[in-house]
Amino acid sequence: MRIHWLPCRKRAPACKKFVMPSSVMLFCRSTKGPSFFNLIVVKMLKQGREEVRIMETQTMQTSPSTQIVNVGGFDIGGPNFTVIAGPCSIESQAQFMETASGVKAAGAHLLRGGIWKMRTSPTAFQGLGANSFDMVRTVCKELNMSLVSEVTDVRQIEEVYDIVECFQVGSRSMQNYELLKELGRQKKPVLLKRGLAAYIDEWIKASEYVTKMGNQNVILCERGIRTFETATRNTLDLNAVAYAKKNTHLPVIVDPSHAVGIRALVPDLAYAAAAVGADGIIVEVHPRPAEALSDGMQALTLNDFSVMMKKLDRILTAIDRPLHKAHKAEVYV
Ligand code: PEP
Ligand code: MN
């Protein structure tokens, strides 16, 4: 790494650790680092002794992705890749248990499963709501897994606080700022999906609604955007993943299921997500997709999921970004 020392008269931002009596502040521009001016270095000259301290900048524009968000015992945004899998909607205890145990056996780390669904048509299945709470309790307890699930309204946060480990904000709710602010007051992590026609900048600013209220545990999720193309459900914007990784401090994951909407293509996009540097994926799985009450077209079968996980493992090993080794049960028991 070559370093360019650029003298600068600006004050150090939020430097709480020490004062700089006779210090010289320098910007350090790394030729290898992920972003221009990604570090600020304070060089202190004390009685002939030179001390260099490195502080990460806090600004959205210049800091690389560094935040680690722990969900149910798994660090998202660290060296390992996280897989969240499960059905689009929780439909019954049997369906949720079958899916959850299948994805766990194939190596998923966390469960997904919709309790309340944001459907385009009001006549489409809206989710079991409160009727699924006991199913979630049973399945999560029996498998020792944690659930990521969407809240569509501020009132739901309290209702599911003890059964949902990470609150998902759906694409259609990305600009529900009151919901974001309320989630910002919570102690649990938030998975923020990108709006289906949102600029990257709007998505990042939406994340700031949460972080500004005090909750720093935000994971960005690219789930495909609307483009002129209609052959696939949406268009996975891999640019956005690379951009968000380099220009925010937050972990970024990909939802290949909603991005492409076609089962046979979901694994390929999951591999692309891994290669572009995403911190994980959230993927829809159903034991019998033809019977699914929502998003059956894009649901992987349990076998598809298992095949995908094996190839994903090989790709991640090749790029030195391995899957979390073991399930929580094995790690923490
Ligand atoms: C979902 O995760 O099932 C979902 C509705 O996703 P999105 O908000 O991205 O459409
Ligand atoms: Mn879905």
Image (cartoon, rainbow, N blue to C red):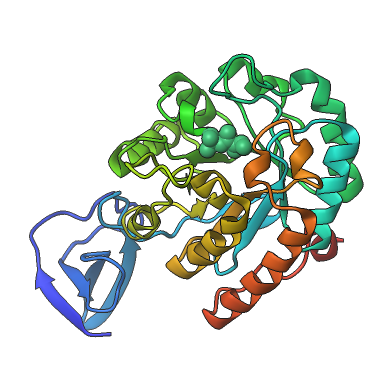
Judged from the image, the quadrant occupied by ligand 1 is top right
Q: On the rendered structure, is 229 left or right of 137?
A: left
Determine whether 100 is above or below 188 in the image. Answer: below
Where, quadrant-wise, is the N terminus in this rendering?
Answer: bottom left
Q: How many marks?
A: 0
Q: Position of residue 32 (x, y in %)?
A: 28, 78
Determine whether 45 is above or below 280 in the image. Answer: below
Instruction: Work out whether residue 323 can be spotted.
Output: yes
Residue depicted at x 38% and y 52%: 237
Q: On the rendered structure, is 12 left or right of 222?
A: left
Q: Position of residue 46 (x, y in %)?
A: 23, 75
Q: Position of residue 82 (x, y in %)?
A: 62, 59
Which corner quadrant of the image does residue 261 belong to?
top right
Residue depicted at x 40% and y 59%: 65
Which corner quadrant of the image does residue 211 belong to?
top left
Determine whether 207 is above or below 257 in the image. Answer: above
Near-viewer residue (70 or 237)? 237
Instruction: Work out whether residue 144 can be spotted.
Output: no
Near-viewer residue (211 or 130)? 130
Q: Position of residue 223 (x, y in %)?
A: 48, 45
Residue depicted at x 86% and y 52%: 101
Q: On the rendered structure, is 256 left or right of 96?
A: left
Determine whether 188 is above or below 255 in the image. Answer: above
Residue furthest out toward the front? 231
Near-viewer residue (254 or 120)? 120
Near-viewer residue (154 or 87)? 87
Where, quadrant-wise, is the C terminus in this rendering?
Answer: bottom right
Q: On the rendered structure, is 263 left or right of 305?
A: left
